[in-house]
Amino acid sequence: MPRIRIDGQAYEVKEGLNLLQACLGLGLNLPYFCWHPALGSVGACRQCALLQYRDEEDRQGRLVMGCMTAVADGQILSLKADKARHFRAGVIEALMTNHPHDCPVCEEGGECHLQDMTVMSGHHHRRYRGRKRTFVNQDLGPFINHEMNRCITCYRCLRFYRDYAGGEDLHALASRNHTYFGRASDGPLESEFAGNLVEVCPTGVFTDKPLSQSYTRKWDLQHAPSICVHCSLGCNISPGERYGRLKRVQNRYHHGINGYFLCDRGRFGFGHVNHPERPQQPLVRENGRLRPVAASEGLAELARRLETTERWIGIGSPRATLESNLALRELVGADHFFTGLGSHPNALNRALLELLRLPGVNTPSLREIEACDALLLLGEDITQSAPRMALSVRQAVRGAGRDRAAALNIPPWQAQSVQIAGQNARHPLFISHVTATRLDPIAEATYRASPQEQAALAFAVAHCLCPEAPAPEGLDEQAQSLAEKIAEALLHAKRPLIVTGPSSGALPLVEAAGQVARALLNARPAEACPPALIPVFAECNSLGLTLLTQDAAEADLEQAFALSEHGPVGAIILENDLFRRAPGPLVQGFLERLTQRIVIDSIPSPTLNAADLVLPATSFAESQGTLINNEGRAQPLFPVHALHAERRNSWQWLAAVAGHRALKGFASPADALATCVTAAPELAPLSQALPSAAHPFTRLAVPRMPHRNSGRTAAGANLDVREDQQPQDHDSCLTFSMEGAPAPWLSRQSGIGARLPFSWYPGWNSNQAVHKFKDAVDGPLRGGESGMRLDLVCRDNGWHRPLPVDTEAQGLLAVVQPAIFGGEELSNLAAPVFQRAALPCLRIHPDDAPAWSVADGDRVLVRGASAATELPLRVDPRVARGIALLPPTCPPLGTGPTRVSLRSLGSDPLIATDHPEPTDG
Amino acid sequence: MDKPLTGALRDDRRPLTLAEYRSAGGYRGLQQAIKNLDPEGVLQQVKDANLRGRGGAGFPTGIKWSFMPRGVGAPKPRYLICNADEMEPGTFKDRLLMEANPHLLIEGMAIAGYALGASIAFIFLRGEYTRAAAHLQRALQEAYDEGCLGSNILGGPFSMELYLHTSAGRYICGEETALINALEGRRANPRTKPPFPQVSGLFGQPTVVNNCETLCNLPAILAEGAAWYRALGRHEDAGTKLFAVTGNVRTPGLWELPMGTPIAEIFEQCAGGMAEGYRLRGFQPGGASTDFLLPQSLELAMDYDVIGKAGSRLGTGSLILLDDRTCPVAMVQNLTHFFAQESCGWCTPCRDGLPWAEQLLTEIDAGRGRPEDLDTLLDLCDQAGPGNTFCALAPGAAAPIQSALRLFREDFDAHIARGSCPYHD
Ligand SMILES: Cc1cc2nc3c(=O)[nH]c(=O)nc-3n(C[C@H](O)[C@H](O)[C@H](O)COP(=O)(O)O)c2cc1C
Ligand code: SF4
Ligand code: SF4
Ligand code: SF4
Ligand code: FES
């Protein structure tokens, strides 16, 4: 390890770093702008200068840029030398010549890297007397504000947006001190990661537009370490609240999962928390109407109703916490607990879980995905269903460029040189899907076919890899040669990866993904790195729910429906809108047959409207509980807001029931977690999260509010001038306060990284403070990351036998295309996300149109086995033949894989719409 | 005197056709290289000739070439680029060569390409040089037709394609790595070095960038030999160079003279001394981005190291003179305006520092300066100094300001004290 000396102090640092990384890793303050831990160095801002001495004798020293200079043994350096300080202050002074200095009205203020660096560099007196240049700003859509006058031209936005995230519609325009970062013309930024610009930009150029609508400074926000609930990846987030309103979501660093970046659904999709139609207090049906009642009355109603019927069933949910699902299961008994999903999605989830169990196969984190060098995406458009993973896949594909650069001895942080040396080198990415995806442009090859044909392709890949794996029948020559090519690439890769998911609705496809991994394991030499296989799931706790119910023989919604046909039965429906799960007529019939309908949920829904008793559940922002992500990582949610008296965690409502149905083991969040630990053997590792002598929940008392939080005691004065008692949190290591004892920020040893509600450190008010909580800038948080991987039991189910592709079937196969915007229940309640949703339409291949006498632009009746719907039709050559590609908002038309028929209702009368045209691919 | 660069030019400056060029001895150097030498031999010749880059930095060409991976196993393709962007104010030497004798450059590039094993070469030409473009285009066609370019050049085993690219027009496109970016279709920002273009250049492949004049020296070196070439120089440096004089002299112009010619000779014998009624105050020896020198430096020999030791740079060898009736503040303001405008916008001391320096110079020139402005100016020059910025544009811009502040300080002070420009009463 190189030994260097900085201002007289000797340090040992890791080889291969640059000086800026080294300094920050040592906890030293060296200001910077253009460097970013994930984007590397480009030497543009010249802010990170320090002095390097030739030898002991050298008194002069020479300025070097920290981010551009590799550490080397024996370096003698100074951050504090006058020459270095003067230079750094001068850089800020020059940057500031055109800056508007509008901090008081700038939404970056209080968490602004430019403010922080200005203070750090010591520039305080303005000498420039000239005019400032001004720019015209752009409307960049519902997510992001644009105020170009604040730009300091660090090029970070461009480097994130284009180089890292693959976006194409953000440019650096013009040059010199007129360089402009924007689009060619006004319009929403197209990248699904545009929201990260809010955090990547060190100034107030790009700010959070939904936040501006009801703006609060970071120092006045109350935060909690939380988990995104908008897909199965479980990105770590830091939501901020004030006056009982959730104001925004920011990234919270997790080394293995999201790193520094979120997707825009995760960032802007929280509108359901503040939704005006959200149930605020219990509702009891009286004379056909739902009447709001107090919590106590709601509870009494629950108890009373539970007595009215002997038989109860509980319907769980993949978007409810483990605790809530388990509490319901305990209440009604395992035999009467249903997942809230049909048999087909349940089977898919179980099959996906089996993939995680495959022995010898690695389950990669998103970070590990970034190091993979041959990738096969099977039947899942992750850009829409697990967006953050798509960003990691992009980094993996770019890895070929990094390798080329490494061969020329270019260090990985030399971002620009890596890009030049790497040019367009890409690791092979193969995408098999029913239609085009946004990753197609960087793919080596794409395969567009029905899910059955895709499964056949994958089975063929497996067979190519390992002759023992049974070959599929009837694969055409082109697909066969593609299969060989894929097999070749996976076989020879250092770290091959297979990704799949439930979106195509085809069980064989999921099984085929496992088959490829298994064949790969057989075909590769024993010493080779094990193949990686990662499933994505449909929802934030799909895997948690599956783990709870995997052994239940009868946990499907159909069985619940059937049960209701045999004698009187009441149902408690937990955080689930059944109309999204099964065809409308079936759900309607079921609800009508029930003797009692109790719905516990945090959002409005048709199911909730049919309830006799509604108990308002907490949203993720008020919940404490556990979610299990797609890799089998259990992560805790902590409430951002203090609990509203009338809203509770779903499990808390159930735990309050007295009498013979009283629940044991749900007295507190810790108690509920302890109950989860024993609910299934594989959940045992959760015990690490339990409070213990070494980790009592409350000893550390991490404040949820920054210590400058203002007006806390007066926040409710418009309602009641008496000052409320500060809410207490006895259930976690967090407090609803700006006070914490001891101040955890100041101790680099405290190791509370995973519990940080927001990132802040003295002198570092922006999110970039996070490096203060790590031992190495690029490393994990000190003290461990949020959550723990479950130890799933390995199981090998042997080879799957490919089914022949069904060529006789009538009708088009309905496949629902996921959508990042407009494709998920919770975020659809967020206005900015819904604004970005594409117009719902049905899409089919041109060759399929004549058979149904339908044409592009028609309104068509789509009829499935159990239900029908009307949609505008787009004829789209990118869709595979034989497929009816349905929008994600389409209600289920049948149970399981469904074939549909089409009938034209004439040309679509719709002339104008606020929705953008669909733009995938 | 031998004039390897301009000896063959026609008096009317019309471009030599291939036939004319041949009859003046053209393509003998290329012939010699391809028929009698292997690429290593050519490289050795160039090293022996002690040819130094004429683009401004004077880097030894042979050494630059030797950083290019060669031989079996070296990455392919490798590229050669002629830097003919020539946008430095006061510099117009490459223009003459390309307009009046385009085959000289083509031959030089073929020789360099042979030595480097470059299969593809580009001439990156300043966009406004439309006449040079037309002449080069015609000459390229002739060269291809006559087998001096393309496959199996002059019947030998070496093949090279040569393309003419006209720049969209920014001074920074002359910086060799920004040039490569521009050629790739990227924004014309310079690149991080290392890696140098010889390792990872155009499209990430090994690339050599040489100035037009540098390349034009090669035919004579190959035809006449390294010793002959070295002997042309009058001082340490070898060969001849195009020297220009601009300013209020009797006959401003451009001359080919031996390296090491004393500045006084260029100034007095070639340019005829100052025009009637003007006295010399100082001069920039190597173009707009070099430090001012005082008249006592006229004795110096135009050699890279001699001028370097005197505190300036030989640069492009284009002398820009300041006379006693021109306001040095206004002159520096004018130069700074150019550099501030041409900053590529990548790094802070240049992008934001130079416009500020320009603003201060404008204020001082207009009589609105303050004494402390001179300290600010010096600060800005320091900030933009060598090593502090991402490329050499900013240090080049700071050079005239800094040296003017040192040498003509009384003019700055007078502007501030009087509240107006003393040259405009
Ligand atoms: C701002 C800037 C502009 C430049 N413009 C030119 C130019 O127009 N022509 C040129 O040959 N070199 C120019 N150079 C120098 C080149 O970067 C490079 O050093 C030169 O082309 C190398 O050729 P040589 O080794 O033959 O001298 C410029 C450098 C800078 C920093
Ligand atoms: S907009 Fe922000 S990120 Fe982009 S260059 Fe300007 S300051 Fe940097
Ligand atoms: S990728 Fe998924 S978990 Fe991550 S921010 Fe987006 S929606 Fe949330
Ligand atoms: S010094 Fe910096 S801003 Fe100026 S031209 Fe060079 S790279 Fe661009
Ligand atoms: S952070 Fe080092 S130059 Fe910008």
Image (cartoon, coloured by chain):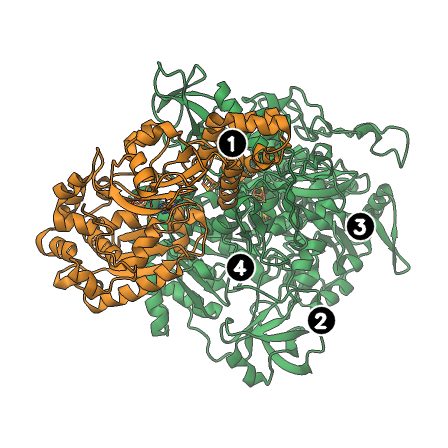
Residue B143 as seen in the image, left or right of residue A896: left
Res B138 → quadrant: bottom left
Marks 2 and 1 sit apart, C-alpha to C-alpha, by 50 Å
The local crowd at label 1, few if under 14, some if 14 to 19, many if 20 or more residues have their Cα within 10 Å, is: many
Left or right: A763 in relation to B126: right
Q: Between label 1 and label 4, give the one nearer the viewer.
A: 1
Residues under numbered marks 2 and 1 in contact, where contact means CB atoms less than 8 Å apart = no
Chain coloured orange: which letter?
B
Tags 3 and 1 both on a single chain: yes
Pointer 1 residue Cβ closer than 8 Å to ligand 5: yes
Chain identity of mark 2: A
**Tag 1 or tag 3, which sits nearer the N-term?**
1
Give coordinates of residue A458: x percent, y percent.
40, 63
In percent of width and height, residue A399 lies at 39, 48
Circle number at residue A912: 2
Residue A97 found in image quarter:
top right
Residue B297 disc label: none
Chain letter, colour green: A
Residue contact between numbered discs 2 and 3, judged by CB atoms under 8 Å: no
Query: Does residue B274 lie above or below A434 as drawn?
Result: above
Depth check: give the residue in front, A49 or A386: A49
Looking at the picture, do discs 1 and 4 lie on one chain?
yes
Q: Label 1 is placed on what type of residue? A: Gln
How far is disc 2 from disc 4 in space, using C-alphas? 34 Å
Q: Which residue is mark 4?
A: A502
Badges 4 and 3, same chain: yes
The extreme front residue here reads: B276
